[in-house]
Amino acid sequence: MPTQWWDRTLTLETKHLGRAVTINSTERAADFLLHEWPQLETGKAYEVAKKALLAAHEGKITPDEVREAMIAAAREDGVFVYGA
């Protein structure tokens, strides 16, 4: 499957104080969510975002819907979202 690029990037804080990551594809979002998520405790929106990533990979939802799920997960888990 080709990379699912996003029309609008998403910038989130990382585990490292003062550092942020800019996400511009569904694949990068999956890597960040699964391996770099700054919170140990996660809420329901985090699980929804994981399912959204899989659904996008299967072509069931759009990359923009994944982006929105990532924003919801970040906000619920207290991860700072820059300019969303």
Image (tube, grey):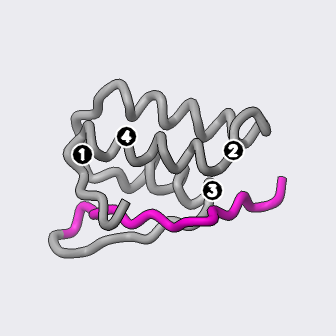
Q: Are marks 2 and 1 in contact (CB under 8 Å)?
A: no
Please give left or right for residue 64 compared with residue 11 in the image.
right
Count of number-bearing discs? 4
Dot 4: few (<14), some (14–19), or many (≥20) neighbours within 10 Å?
Answer: some
Q: Outermost residue, right direction?
A: 1
Q: Nearer the viewer, mark 2 or mark 1?
A: 2
Q: Secondary structure at mark 2?
A: loop
Residue 72 x, y percent position in the rendering: 37, 40
Q: Position of residue 35 (x, y in %)?
A: 43, 52
Residue type at the position of mark 2: Thr
Identify the residue under disc 3: 27
Whole-percent x, y for residue 81 in the image: 30, 58
- For residue 39, the mark is 1
* Cα distance between the residues tagged 3 and 2: 13 Å
Q: Which mark is residue 62?
A: 2
Q: Residue at x 51, y 67 (%)?
A: 9
Q: What is the CA distance from the residue labelled 2 to the residue labelled 4? A: 16 Å
